[in-house]
Image (spheres, rainbow, N blue to C red):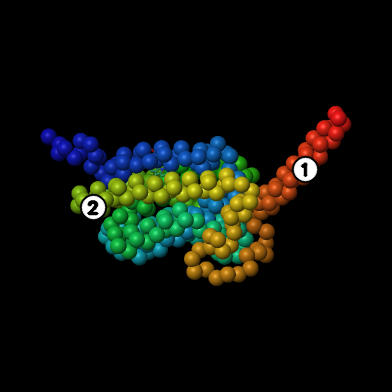
Amino acid sequence: MEPPQSESMPQDLSEALKEATKEVHVQAENSEFMRNFQKGLLTPEGLKMVMASLYHIYTALEEEIERNKGNPVYAPLYFPEELHRKVALEQDMAFWYGPHWQEIIPYTPAVQRYVGCLHEVGRTEPELLVAHAYTRYLGDLSGGQVLKKIAQKALNLPSSGEGLAFFTFPNINSAAKFKQLYRARMNTLEMTPEVRRRVIEEAKTAFLLNIQLFEELQGLLTQGPKDQSLLEAPGLHRRAGSRAQDPTPVEAPRGKTQLSSFSQAPLIRWVLTLSFLVATVAMGLYAI
Ligand code: HEM
């Protein structure tokens, strides 16, 4: 007879993680930001925000992976050439924000929380790093590929993949085969039942950190035109420790046009309101 634990929870870590995160995965897919993304209702501001967030997240994740690459709790999952996203995201940052992207990209509270969690795990509980790597990299190799096509179409981006390097894995021929290899490697990790339980909990936490990020981004994107400027205001969300410099890019970053037309919206609204008032008063006088 099977032990009771395996009746409810699959034996392989890869299966257990998939099973345990099913519900939060649905929640992530159904977050307003992701629903809009899937419908192609994506703006350059939205994509810029999420890409900048991912830049900070992957910088932290990959810093902690490098720290733990020789640790047997992570070593079998060390695939820098195939998976690591930091360099790709740097290219995307330059595309979207211009050459001075490092000084101007946003660093919002939800991202700071996520980054803080990654450093904490990498430094103090490296046995849980697998949960974070699984959540991001297997996600990017799955739904991420659909999202790339949607973004390309919605924003009319070049098919060369410029601006979306994050979604491209040039050193992986078959995502399906690589995911199989990755799952097999996860299943070789030796862990006590207690650590395994914590890894599974940490994967759910990782999903929740992503969901909180989407909620925050959606909130920022739907705020009034005045607050739209916060989306890339240097200083307000600048990464801790970065130097204050002229944020004006030499080359116009992508998505600027839309932002500047946003900033004209209040003026247009005032002119329309004023015209309406003048017309109402004129009609009133005429009626008298
Ligand atoms: C619009 C949003 C999303 C869509 C359409 C989507 C879609 C998918 C699809 C089609 C798969 C493959 C399922 C399979 O092979 O059985 C998958 C797997 C996965 N997704 Fe997502 N996903 C989305 C968002 C996310 C997010 C936000 C995360 C986490 C940050 C994530 C993490 C994962 C992971 C870890 C897997 C691998 C599951 C496993 O095989 O163990 N996904 N996703």
As displayed, is residue 23 above or below residue 140? above
In the orientation shown, which residue stands out farthest toward the left?
Answer: 1
- Residue type at mark 2 is Val
Give the residue number, with chain letter if any, for mark 1.
Answer: 274
The quarter holding residue 41 reads: top right
Query: x, y percentage for residue 85?
Result: 47, 56
What residue sits 37% from the left and 50% below the top? Answer: 206
Q: Is residue 105 left or right of residue 175?
A: right
As displayed, is residue 45 above or below residue 233? above
Query: x, y percentage for residue 149?
Result: 55, 42
The first of marks 2 and 1 along the sequence is 2
Q: Residues within 10 Å of mark 1 (few under 14, many from 20)?
A: few
As displayed, is residue 143 above or below residue 62? above
What residue sits 59% from the left and 59% below the top? Answer: 233
Query: x, y percentage for residue 131?
Result: 33, 51
Comparing 209 with 161, the one in front is: 209
Q: Say which element carries label 2.
A: helix
Ligand 1 position by quadrant: top left
Question: In this orientation, does residue 26 appear?
Answer: yes
Give the residue number, with chain letter if any, for mark 2.
Answer: 195
- Residue type at mark 1 is Leu
